[in-house]
Image (cartoon, rainbow, N blue to C red):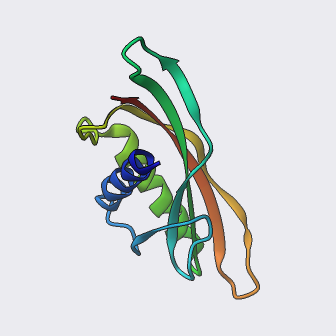
Amino acid sequence: METQQDLVDAIRALAMTANPYSQIVSGSTPPINGICMIQAPSSPASIFKNKGMLKEMSILINAKNADQSLVYSTLCEIHKVLTKTWNYPNSGEFQVIDIETEAEPNLLGREENNQWIYGSSVLVKYFWR
């Protein structure tokens, strides 16, 4: 849905304020020396009589880089920015209520081209109007 993509785009823009080593692209596989973000399947937590919904959305954040410490510290900084903000994204369609770490940055593997791959996720709680 368009509103969900708008929400992911807003979270991506907020994550970019962490000044990561590359742009954060949409998708599940990061480019070389890159970072990506994608929505995981989700469903409403509560539906109200006016058809507004309290929802939770998991967003996966994957990154890879030849410098293992850089990729790990960058994901940690992105999580810090997302979970410590007081200025949550909102629009006429949604209002973010909270963002919490669902899975800390962790090593997923190393590619043959010496790119270290790390993955993590955040849980976004929001009201869909």
Instruction: Work out whether residue 94 or residue 98 is closer to the camera in this orientation and state it.
Output: 94
Which residue corresponds to the image point at 72% horizontal and 62% vertical from the top-left?
108
Image position of 108 with respect to 47: above or below: below
Residue 11, percent from left and from top: 37, 50
Image position of 105 with respect to 84: above or below: below
As drawn, which residue projects farthest toward the front? Answer: 50
As drawn, which residue projects farthest toward the top? Answer: 49
Which residue corresponds to the image point at 52% horizontal and 66% vertical from the top-left?
36
Which residue corresponds to the image point at 56% horizontal and 66% vertical from the top-left?
27
**Horizontal arrangement in the rendering, residue 71 relative to residue 18 (left or right):** right
Residue 59, percent from left and from top: 53, 48
**Horizontal arrangement in the rendering, residue 129 relative to residue 59 (left or right):** left
**Horizontal arrangement in the rendering, residue 1 relative to residue 94 (left or right):** right
As drawn, which residue projects farthest toward the bottom? Answer: 113
Based on the displayed image, in which of its 4 quarters is residue 96 positioned?
Answer: top left
Residue 53, percent from left and from top: 43, 24
Instruction: Work out whether residue 87 or residue 115 is closer to the camera in this orientation and state it.
Output: 87
Instruction: Work out whether residue 31 or residue 19 is closer to the camera in this orientation and state it.
Output: 31
Which residue corresponds to the image point at 54% horizontal and 27% vertical from the top-left?
44
Instruction: Work out whether residue 43 or residue 80 is closer to the camera in this orientation and state it.
Output: 43
Image position of 92 with respect to 9: above or below: above
Quadrant containing the C terminus in the rendered view: top left
Residue 41, percent from left and from top: 62, 43
Image position of 29 with respect to 113: above or below: above
Count numbered badges in the picture: 0
